[in-house]
Amino acid sequence: MTEVLDQTPHAPPAPPRSRWHRLILGPGFIRAAWMTALFFGIGFGLVVGLRSLAGYDPALDWLIIVTVAGLITAPLGFLAGLGAFDYWVYYALGYPTRDEDHSGHGARSWKDYFRVNTDHKVIGVQYVVTTIVFFLAGGLMAMIFRAELAKPGMQFLDNQEYNGLISVHAALMIFLFVIPAFAGLANYVIPLMIGAPDMAFPRLNALSFWLLPIAGIIMLSSVAVPGGAFGAGWTGYAPLSVVGTNGNVWFNMGVQWAGASSIMTALNFLVTIITMRAPGMTFWRMPLLVWANFTTSLLVVLATPFVAGSQFFVMFDRLMHTNFFNFHEGGYVLGYQHIFWFYSHPAVYIMMLPGFGIASEVISVFSRKPIFGYRLMALSLCAILVLGFSVWAHHMFVSGMASWLRVPMMVTTLLIAVPTGIKVFSWLATTWEGRIHLETPMLWALGFVSMFVIGGLSGIMLGAVPIDIHVSDTYFVVAHIHYVLLGGSLFTIFAGIYYWFPKMTGRMYNERLGKLHFWLTFIGFNLTFFPMHIIGVQGMPRRVSDYSPQFSTWNMIISISSFFLGVSFVVFLYNAITSWIRGPIAEANPWHAMTLEWQVSSPPPIFNFDEIPQIVGGPYEYGVPGARHAVFNGAREESLEEARSP
């Protein structure tokens, strides 16, 4: 045994390295820069070499070269240079295991937010800030095309530029803002909520974040592609996405990188929630935000491979001349829509369920009441998970699909309103006779409920076949999706940001500016999107850059209101930045909440808890005398001593 131990490899002492050696070869943006160029060269060589060996003419096909070298291998080089793979590569090559000194874990200065960091709290902040940047980019695009739509005729854009702007806007908002913003908030608070020191796979967690800016940069850079950005909408419908501009390849690959990030994050959440809960935290003691992210993660893992497959098929049709969706060569054009919507309707709930969890947390805390029907709320999340896979074809009632499929899809669409209705009535019942505190997070949560109800009602109308046929591809659909996704997701994202801002930054935000931000957004949002119901029913088509003069008045009102809505976000940016720098120091628990993340300092310790928490009750027992969600070691020993004393 001694001989075996003596033969165990040990890492030799590292020779001293010069500053320049560390700067150029150490993980960071400098190494990322030259490794990005190196991997681009490798991709270039692979394409040209293989095409030359196979006898393809020309060997220099720049679309294929840029796809492989620029959109696949170069991002891999960037990640490798940044240090995302260092530990795994070292292990895979058979080198001795290196001691973990936790130097890449936790934020000790602002520079740590620009590195590969394995602390879930740092990663959560990285997610939220990055998604806000992409939200700004998508919002600016919306301002441009709303200026174009302010009156009939063509003012600033041509048709392709319009299609490109509206497509990139929607893709950024969905794939680079809503979905990852929820992932960022959950990344920060879920391990704290369940009493875990970190996520189950910290290095995978770090990698999943760094895939996100790659996806966003790819989508944004499509506007510089000769011929224009991808113009087939965020749905990327075939055959337009196959025969349209080359920018569609950028959309295909952007979705792949964003989808890979989502799947990694979801797997991490599932393993963390299942295996790392604190002692005493059963599933029926988990906060509803944990339930929401558990069901969302199941949706992501099950559904996202379908959208990845659809984008690969489109890219193969364009680059490799396959015929998955080429009707003239026997391709099945409607197959794209079936594959895409089998993912994308569950994706609607991927963009909604975390918001349901945030709303439950905020409404319970600021009503000072337990959540009404806690178990039914958790089970309704599971019901949405199951039913979400049975309604995809209601997006295709006018597509030419088999007519017999319409009625079953209409029934399941109307049926899924039941578990969502349970949640709305539970939130209302929670506020009933509660001691309501209308702080900024509560305003956003209540605003979400009202906006989501309007979006849900229009969704029930669209689920009915006759109504859907009449208003399909009109502004009525635009109004519906914005009330559900912007009024639903955006409002809950802001509720979460304001609610956990003290925990994330250690500072309190300006309450007056927070309320001003809410009211400006609430008014601007409704003035922008509610009139779309009216002109949609009247026949105003969506996805058009010009329209009939009869809709000019309403479009002018919508465009002016959209700029008002855009300005409201400036208030948030000012409030967030100034409060983070010099806001009042936050207490550990300024909201007097019961969940675990509020039982530690603001910001929390690097490994979250100095003592292991013991869960002894539910997370929402407000108003119940003596109720506690958790106790720590010292408090538990005191309570045991009291129990033993006569």
Image: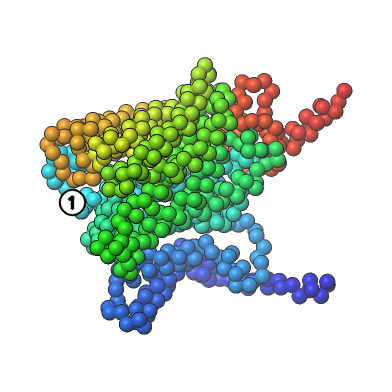
Tell which residue pokes out farthest to the top in this image.
Answer: 433
Residue appearing at x 54%, y 64% in the figure: 85
Task: Name the residue carrying label 1.
Answer: 159
Which part of the image, by quadrant, shows the C terminus?
top right
The colour scheme of the drawn protein is rainbow
Left or right of 196 in this view: 634: right
- The residue drawn where x is 82% and y is 30% is 641
From what the image shows, is residue 613 above or below residue 316?
above
Q: Residue at x 52, y 34 (%)?
A: 380
Q: Quadrant of residue 565?
A: top left
Residue shown at 27%/48% (left/top)?
400
- In terms of depth relative to the viewer, which is nearer, 180 or 128? 180
Q: Nearer the viewer, residue 187 or 506?
A: 187
Residue 216, relative to residue 11: is it above or below?
above
Considering the image in quadrants, where does the N terminus appear? bottom right
Q: Amino acid at mark 1?
A: Asn
Q: Quadrant of residue 616?
A: top right
Q: Position of residue 100 (x, y in %)?
A: 65, 60
Snapshot quadrant of residue 455: top left
User: In this view of the protein, can residue 238 be seen by the observer?
Assistant: yes
Image x and y of residue 71, in percent: 38, 64
Residue 441: horizontal and vertical position, in percent? 47, 30
Tell me the crowding category of disc 1: few under 14, some 14 to 19, or many 20 or more residues within 10 angstroms, Cα based: few
In the displayed structure image, the side of residue 461 where residue 118 appears, left or right: right
Left or right of 103? Residue 63 is left
State the SS at label 1: helix
Point out residue 432 in the picture as x, y percentages from the top left corner.
50, 18
User: Is residue 492 positioned above or below 94 on the image?
Assistant: above
